Image (cartoon, helix red, strand yellow):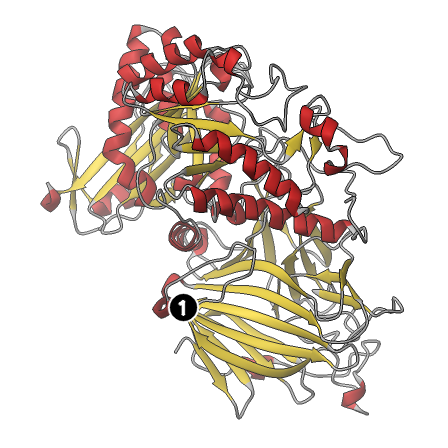
C-alpha cells in the first residue's frame, strides 16, 4: 500500500518508491503537516514542538494551554480564522461577508486508482498504478466541506494534490482564496527556483534565497503567462544538479495563478500554490461545489537532475494524451515566417513542394486563411475559408498538399475576435468588454467570453465545419493577448474570478471536444509562443510552441529553463531563416538544426530561398531527427552546462533508459583565437560499459562521465555539433 493510515496515532503516510509525505490529525482535530522528504518508515510527528509563543494566539479548543498555536505549527491546508497570521491557502466569507472559518478533520477514504477532476486536466494512471486519499475537513458553522485529494503514483515518485469545496448550507458563501496545495518546511536555509520571462524570452531560471518575509510570483493575465511559469522548485541552498534536497510544485492549470514562499518568524517556510486570489471572489451557492486545480509534487534528494527526470516522465506518460503521446510527430514546415499574411494557394503549394522534396512531412497553414484576415487587425472569429485567397476550397488545398505525400495542418485562434469581423458585429456581447468603458485591446483584438457555453458551441461548430471538409492532421491553437475588461453579460453577472475560472473550463472543453471528434489529430498549443506553456495545456496538446523567438541562441536559454519541468517532447522548436526575424542574429544552418532538434522538430521558412548546400543540410537534419527521435523524445535528458552562467558553451545530452545509446549536442558560443580547450562531462551512462562513437572511437562510460570530452575547435561563433554513442554490445 502506498497510503497508510495509523488509526492509533492519527497519522497518514503517503509513500512513493523514494519519498514519504506525512500528516497528522492532532488532539483538537486540526490536520498538521509533519514531513515531506526521502522515504522513511517512522512517524515524524515527534518533530512537532509546542511552546508558548507569546503573541501567537491559541484556538479555543486548547483552553488554557498557551503552548498550542496554529501560528507556529506546520499545517496541511492552512485557513484564515485559525489564528495563523502566515500566508493561508483558504479563506471564505459567509452571507454577511464575514471572513473566517475553522476546518476540522471529519473523515477519510483510501481508494485504488487515481482521482479525476470534472472539467479540469489532471494526472491520470491505470488503477494498479496509483492510489487516492481523500480527506474531508468540515466547518460546522458554515456547513462547508473541504475535501483534500492526494494521488500517489509510487513508481513515479509523484504525489498530486487538489481540493474540492462544497457549500452544504442554505446561504451563499464567497471563496476569497482556494489554493490547491500548501507545504510547510520546518527547518532549512532554502531557495526558491522559479522561471520568469517575457514574450519571446520565456522561462529564464532564477534562484532566489528565501529570507524572512514572503516572496510571490504569479500571473493575473488570464493565462499562466510568459512572465512567470507555474512551476517552482524549493531547494536547500547547497542543492545542485546532481546533489541536494529539493521538491517541485507544478500547477496543472493554464489561467491565473500564484505561488508564495514565506519564511516565518521561527525560520519555518511555507510554500503555497493555486489560483491567484486577487479578484477571485468566487460565489458558492447552496449545494454548489468548486474544484481547485491539481498540483504535481515530487521530491529529490539527488538534486535538480533527478527531479527533472521525474517530472519529464510523469508529464510524458501521465499528463500528455492522444495518438502522438509516444509516437514520433511529423517533421513540419510552417509558412508564418516565410509569408506572414502575404500568400495564396500557389505560394503555399510551392513551399510545400520544395519541403516535401527535402523530406519534410507536413505543411502547416498559419494565420490568414479565413474571413477577411489579411492583417492582424481584422477577421478573427470569422471561421470560414477565404477561397478567393487560397484559390480553392480548404479540401482542395489540403488534397493538393497531401498528394505530395505530406500531411496538412491549420492554425486557429478560437478564443479571440476582432471588432472588424462579422462575429463581433452580430454578437458584441460575446467579447469581454465593460459597459460604458472603452476596451483594452491587445494585438488589436478582444477576448471571447468562453465562460458562456453558447460561445464555445458557436466556435466549435464553425471550426469543426472547416476541419470536417478538409484533410487536416494537425491544429496549432494560438492565443495572442492577455485578458482584461472581464465582464460577462449573463444573468447574475458573476465575479471576475468566477468568470475567468469558467473561461478556462470553456477552453479545456473546446480542446476536449476537438480531440474527441478528431482522435488522430496532433494538437499543438501556443499563446504568443510560450504564454501558456504549462501542464494543463499538455493534457490536451502533447507539444506547445515554446516561444515566438526562433533565434537559435535565444532558444538555448529558453529551452534550458523549460527543461527543468517539461519533457523535450513537449517543446515545439523550428529552424528559421537568418537574419533571424526576432533578433537579427545570423547563426549557422547546422547550429539552428541541432538546437531545434531538442524539441519537436520543424522548419519556419521558405526552403525555396535557401542555398543548395543548405538544402542538403535539410535532408541530413531530417534523417538525423528520424534516426535519433527515440532518444530525443524518450531518452533521459541531462543538462551538461548551466546556460545562464556558462558563457563559452552549451551542452546537453539524451540517454536511452537502458543506457544503451546516447546523443550529446554541443553549441560553442564564442570564437576565440588560441583559446583554452573546453571540456564537457557526460551523464547517465553505464560506467562499466564501452561506448563506440560514430567515428569508431571507443570510450568507457566512466571516462566519458568523469573525464569528459574535449569540445572541438570550431571556426566561427555559434557553431554546433553532435556526438552519438552506442554501447558496444548493442552494435
Q: Is 62 on the left-hand or right-hand side of 465? A: right
Q: Residue at x 59, y 36 (%)?
A: 459
Which quadrant, please, contains the N terminus? bottom left
Q: Position of residue 685 (x, y in %)?
A: 25, 48
Q: Position of residue 258 (x, y in %)?
A: 67, 52
Is 3 situated above or below 90? below
Is 619 situated above or below 278? above
For the residue labelled by badge 1, is the local secondary structure a helix, a strand or a loop? Answer: loop
Residue 708 found in image quarter: top left
Q: Using the image as rendered, state which of residue 72 and residue 342 is in the foreground.
A: 342
* Badge 1: residue crowd in 10 Å (few <14, some 14–19, many ≥20): many
Number of numbered discs present? 1
Residue 107 found in image quarter: bottom right
Residue 485 found in image quarter: top right
Q: Using the image as rendered, state which of residue 471 and residue 220 is in the foreground.
A: 471
Res 527 visible: yes
Is 660 situated above or below 94? above
Q: Residue at x 42, y 25 (%)?
A: 574
Res 647 visible: no
Q: Is 702 on the left-hand or right-hand side of 592? A: left
Q: Position of residue 467 (x, y in %)?
A: 46, 32
Is 17 situated above or below 631? below
Which quadrant, please, contains the C terminus? top left
Q: Residue at x 54, y 73 (%)?
A: 35
The residue pinned by badge 1 equals 130
Amino acid at each position: 500500500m502506498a497510503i497508510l493510515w495509523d488509526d492509533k496515532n492519527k497519522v497518514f503516510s503517503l509513500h512513493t518508491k523514494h519519498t514519504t509525505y506525512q500528516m497528522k490529525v492532532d488532539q483538537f482535530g486540526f490536520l498538521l503537516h509533519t514531513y515531506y522528504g526521502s522515504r522513511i518508515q517512522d512517524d515524524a510527528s515527534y518533530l512537532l514542538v509546542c511552546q508558548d509563543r507569546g503573541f501567537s494566539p491559541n484556538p479555543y479548543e486548547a483552553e488554557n494551554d498557551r503552548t498550542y498555536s496554529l501560528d507556529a505549527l506546520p499545517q496541511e491546508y492552512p485557513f484564515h480564522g485559525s489564528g495563523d497570521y502566515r500566508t493561508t491557502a483558504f479563506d471564505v466569507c459567509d452571507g454577511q461577508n464575514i471572513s473566517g472559518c475553522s476546518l476540522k478533520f471529519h473523515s477519510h477514504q483510501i481508494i485504488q486508482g487515481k482521482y479525476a477532476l470534472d472539467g479540469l486536466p489532471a494526472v491520470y494512471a491505470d488503477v494498479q498504478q496509483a492510489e487516492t486519499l481523500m480527506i474531508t475537513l468540515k466547518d460546522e458553522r458554515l456547513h462547508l466541506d473541504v475535501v483534500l485529494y492526494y494521488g500517489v503514483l509510487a513508481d513515479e515518485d509523484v504525489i498530486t494534490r487538489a481540493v474540492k469545496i462544497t457549500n452544504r448550507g442554505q446561504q451563499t458563501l464567497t471563496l476569497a482564496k482556494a489554493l490547491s496545495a500548501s507545504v510547510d518546511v520546518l527547518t532549512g536555509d532554502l531557495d526558491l527556483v522559479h522561471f520568469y520571462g517575457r514574450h519571446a524570452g520565456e522561462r529564464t531560471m532564477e534562484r532566489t534565497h528565501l529570507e524572512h518575509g514572503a516572496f510571490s510570483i504569479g500571473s493575473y493575465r488570464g493565462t499562466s503567462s510568459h512572465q512567470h511559469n507555474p512551476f517552482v522548485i524549493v531547494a536547500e541552498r547547497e542543492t545542485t544538479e546532481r546533489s541536494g534536497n529539493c521538491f517541485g510544485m507544478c500547477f496543472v492549470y493554464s489561467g491565473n495563478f500564484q505561488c508564495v514562499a514565506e519564511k516565518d518568524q521561527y525560520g519555518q517556510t511555507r510554500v503555497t500554490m493555486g489560483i491567484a486570489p486577487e479578484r477571485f471572489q468566487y460565489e458558492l451557492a447552496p449545494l454548489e461545489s468548486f474544484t481547485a486545480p491539481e498540483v504535481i509534487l515530487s521530491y529529490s534528494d539527488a538534486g535538480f537532475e533527478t527531479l527533472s527526470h521525474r517530472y519529464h516522465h510523469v508529464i510524458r506518460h501521465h499528463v500528455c494524451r492522444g495518438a502522438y503521446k509516444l509516437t514520433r510527430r511529423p517533421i513540419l514546415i510552417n509558412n508564418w515566417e516565410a509569408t506572414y499574411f502575404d500568400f495564396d494557394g500557389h505560394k503555399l503549394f510551392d513551399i510545400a513542394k520544395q519541403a516535401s522534396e527535402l523530406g519534410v512531412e507536413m505543411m502547416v497553414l498559419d494565420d490568414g486563411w479565413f474571413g477577411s484576415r489579411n492583417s492582424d487587425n481584422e477577421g478573427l472569429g470569422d471561421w470560414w475559408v477565404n477561397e478567393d485567397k487560397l484559390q480553392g476550397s480548404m479540401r482542395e488545398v489540403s488534397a493538393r498538399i497531401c498528394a505530395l505525400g505530406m500531411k496538412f495542418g491549420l492554425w486557429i485562434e478560437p478564443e479571440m475576435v476582432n471588432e472588424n469581423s462579422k462575429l463581433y458585429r452580430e454578437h458584441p456581447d460575446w467579447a469581454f468588454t465593460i459597459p460604458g468603458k472603452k476596451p483594452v485591446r491587445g494585438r488589436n483584438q478582444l477576448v471571447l467570453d468562453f465562460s458562456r457555453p453558447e460561445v464555445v458551441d458557436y466556435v466549435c461548430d464553425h471550426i469543426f465545419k472547416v476541419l470536417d471538409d478538409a484533410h487536416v492532421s494537425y491544429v496549432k491553437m494560438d492565443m495572442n493577448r492577455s485578458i482584461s475588461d472581464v465582464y460577462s453579460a449573463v444573468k447574475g453577472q458573476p465575479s471576475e474570478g468566477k468568470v475567468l475560472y469558467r473561461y478556462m473550463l470553456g477552453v479545456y472543453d473546446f480542446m476536449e471536444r476537438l480531440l474527441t471528434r478528431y482522435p488522430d489529430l496532433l494538437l499543438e498549443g501556443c499563446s504568443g509562443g510560450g504564454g501558456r506553456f504549462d501542464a494543463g495545456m499538455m493534457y490536451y496538446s502533447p507539444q506547445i510552441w515554446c516561444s515566438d523567438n526562433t533565434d537559435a541562441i535565444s532558444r538555448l536559454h529558453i529551452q534550458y529553463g523549460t527543461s527543468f519541468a517539461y519533457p523535450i517532447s513537449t517543446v515545439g522548436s523550428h529552424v528559421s531563416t537568418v537574419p533571424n526575424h526576432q533578433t537579427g542574429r545570423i547563426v549557422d544552418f547546422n547550429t539552428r538544426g541541432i538546437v531545434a532538434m531538442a524539441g519537436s522538430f520543424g522548419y519556419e521558412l521558405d526552403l525555396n530561398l535557401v542555398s543548395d548546400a543548405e538544402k542538403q543540410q535539410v535532408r541530413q537534419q531530417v534523417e538525423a531527427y528520424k534516426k535519433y527521435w527515440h532518444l530525443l523524445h524518450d531518452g533521459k535528458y541531462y543538462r551538461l552546462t548551466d546556460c545562464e552562467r556558462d558563457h563559452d558553451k552549451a551542452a546537453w545530452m539524451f540517454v536511452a533508459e537502458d543506457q544503451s545509446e546516447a546523443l550529446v549536442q554541443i553549441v560553442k558560443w564564442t570564437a576565440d583565437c588560441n583559446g583554452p580547450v573546453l571540456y564537457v562531462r557526460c551523464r547517465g551512462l553505464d560506467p562499466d560499459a564501452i561506448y563506440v562513437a560514430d567515428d569508431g572511437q571507443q570510450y568507457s562510460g566512466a571516462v566519458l562521465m568523469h573525464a569528459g570530452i574535449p569540445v572541438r575547435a570550431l571556426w566561427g561563433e555559434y557553431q554546433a555539433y553532435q556526438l552519438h554513442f552506442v554501447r558496444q554490445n548493442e552494435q
